[in-house]
Amino acid sequence: MESAASTEYRAVTWSRSFLSAKDHSAVLMDPNPPFLATYKALFDSRQPQQSDTDQMGAAEEYELPVIDLSHLNGKPKEEQCKRDIMAAASEWGFFQVVNHGVSSGVMDRLREVQVGVFRRPFEKKASEKLPDFSPENYRWGTPTPTSLEQLSWSEAYHIPLAPSTGVAKASTRHIMEEFSTAMSRLAHQLVVILARGLGCDGTYIKENCTCNTCYLRLNRYPPCPVKNGVFGLIPHTDSSFLTIVRQDQVGGLQLMKDGSWITVKPNLNALIVNIGDLFQAWSNGVYKSVEHRVMSNPQLERFSVAYFLCPSYDTVIQSHAEPAIYREFSFGEYKQQVREDVRRTGHKVGLSRFLAQST
Ligand SMILES: O=C(O)CCC(=O)C(=O)O
Ligand SMILES: [Fe+2]
């Protein structure tokens, strides 16, 4: 029996086989990675009744807790604001912040850079060695998915923030640095509040997560002509201490809340903050690293940018409290285990590999 997905796929390949010379050059200029052609077998094998995908996009839309950071810095509502941050990090693992100190001008300029770099023809993204935007830093799709559930219909640039040595800075680097400096300030402000809420001082995270080890990820989610249930980004938790995301108005970010997926209502004034695996381990499970995903959109392209607060690979993550839920591990060991699990099973297993009693 032919699935709806394979019918749509054939419609696209059919039209490509009748391309005029003019159309052919349009394909060469196409910014979109060849998802349909590359993952043809996955789309062909999809049986609509085998997936819950029709429900996926329809998850209920929620406004995440919004925290107004203008109440910090000695203002009367400062203590309440801190309590709200701690409550959101432990109950939701996700929250939004407004009056966060990252200027909209900087964010808009970064978006222009991001749109420009992704709008280049796919051939160039896959081969042209621009500083910061080289093929080694570029990902599209998923390396070797064995089912549609493992496919991410998106492309991304991974931008390490360690200062580049001996290389003239591209003009785009300046705006990325301006953005990440502001994000770093915000991330540190939040981790100090969260650490103090646990009775610690936050020095450990501040000292280990420097600009040498943090990174940005610029994401683009092209429209996906295969309707229903194709992931823009597969369900995952972040391996960071903390992640801060700016999404646009398109929406599609979903997170797990009380056993169900909910859709995050876009709020252009807000940045989205989420707890990563390392903070869950360090806080001994008080703050939650929550599974999230992005659903693809049939018509609209979506952009987002994420700042990941991470330590160096040799940093040892140890719970601040006893008895510890997780055993001690280094961030390098964690990343290595994640890579190995993804290669072997197609999935990140994550923190459950590091439970204290399993050592
Ligand atoms: O695009 C988004 O909204 C989320 C991105 C994300 O979860 C990630 O890059 O890890
Ligand atoms: Fe994420």
Image (cartoon, grey):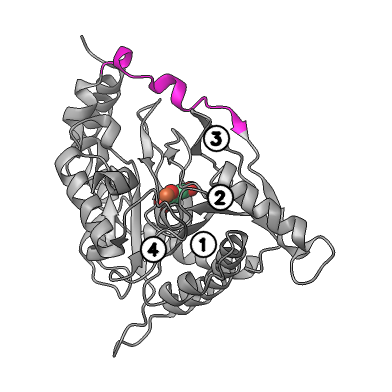
Q: Which residues are magenta?
A: 47-61
Name the residue type under label 1: Arg
Q: Which numbered marker is on residue 111?
A: 1
Q: Earlier in the sequence, mark 1 or mark 3?
A: 1
Lower sequence index among marks 4 and 3: 4
Expressed as whole percent of the image width and height from the top left, the position of residue 274 reads: 51, 52
Task: Provide the residue designation for mark 3.
Answer: 263
- Name the residue nearer the viewer: 70 or 320: 320
Report the disc number at residue 218.
none
Badge nearest the viewer, 1 or 3: 3
How far apart are labels 4 and 3 at the CA level? Answer: 28 Å
Q: Which residue is mark 4?
A: 117
| Numbered disc 1: secondary structure | helix
Tell me: residue 168, above or below residue 3: below
Q: Amino acid at mark 2?
A: Asp
* Residue 112 locus on image (x, y percent): 50, 64
Q: CA distance from mark 2 to mark 1?
A: 10 Å
CB atoms of marks 3 and 2 within 8 Å: no
Q: In the rendered structure, does residue 50 fall within the stretch colored magenta?
A: yes
Q: Quadrant of the N terminus?
A: top left
